[in-house]
Image (cartoon, grey):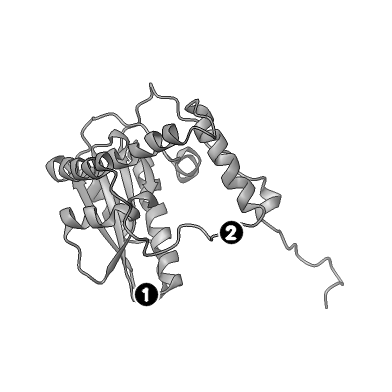
Amino acid sequence: MDVYEAAKSRRAVRAFTDRHVPREVLERVLSAAAWSPSGSNLQPWHAYVLTGEPLAELKKRAGRRLAAGDPWDEREYEMYPPVLKSPYRERRFAFGEERYGELHISREDWEARQRAAAANWDCFGAPAALFCYIDRDLGLPQWADTGMYLQTVMLLLRAEGLHSCPQMAWSVYRRTVAEVLSPPDGLILFCGMSIGFEDATVSCARTGRAPLDETVTFVEAWPTGEGS
C-alpha cells in the first residue's frame, strides 16, 4: 500500500473483529513512527500499548464506571473551544448528523447517543489499544508534534492492513486508564487509539472532507515582469 492509498483509506473505524494483532506488527509500526518529525527532536510522545488481559481489565473497569453512572474525570485540556465559529461549527454538526444518522439515532434521543458513545470504553471491540501521553510541562508545538506522531502511526497501521480509531474520549476516563498503566505523574493523557482489523459486516461510512479551496490557498509564482 503506497502512502496515498494509506492516507485516503485511513478513517476512524468504530467496529473491529477480535482477530489477534501480532506484537511484531505493532513493534514494526511504532519503530517506524519514531521517525515522525518533532521540533529539536524532542519526541514528546509517550505511548503505552495494551493487548490481552491488561486491555480486558481496562475495558472491565471502564465498563463498571459506566454502569455505575460515575461522573467523568475533570478534563486536563479542552477538546474544543466553548464556542465554535464557522465553518468549524457546521462541520462538527454535519459529522454528528452523519454519525448518528448511520446508527438511526435521532438528535433528540440522548440516551441512545450515550449508549453509542459507550462503545468507546470497549475500544469498539478492538483487541489492541494505544494510549498516548504528553508531558504537562510542554507547549502547543509539542502537542502538534504528538499529533504528527499519531497520524504516522495510523498511516503505518493502514500499510499493515489494520485500522484504527483515535479517541480523545478516553481523556475523561484518565484515572481509570492510569490505574492500569501507572504513568508518571507529570504526564497528561492526550488520547487513546483502538487498533485492529475492521469488522466489515458493520456499516461505517467515511466522513467527507471540505473542498480543497476551503482549506488551501495557492499563491502562484509572479508572472514575468510583475512583483518586482
User: Which residue lies at the image location 76% right of the left edge and 65% below the top edge?
Assistant: 221
- Quarter of the figure with the N terminus: top left
User: Which residue lies at the image location 70% right of the left edge and 58% below the top edge?
Assistant: 217
Q: Which residue is disc 1 drawn over? A: 138
Which amino acid, mark 1? Leu
Crowd around label 2: few <14 · some 14–19 · many ≥20 (10 Å): few
Quarter-wise, where is residue 188 in the image?
Answer: bottom left
The numbered mark at residue 128 is none
Q: Which residue is disc 2 drawn over? A: 83
User: Which residue lies at the image location 53% right of the left edge and 39% below the top edge?
Assistant: 96
Quarter-wise, where is residue 134 in the image?
Answer: bottom left
The front one of 43 and 54 is 54
Q: Say whether disc 1 or disc 2 marks the residue closer to the N-terminus.
A: 2
Image location of residue 192, percent across then percent down: 32, 51
Image location of residue 132, percent across then percent down: 30, 57
Q: Is residue 119 visible?
A: yes
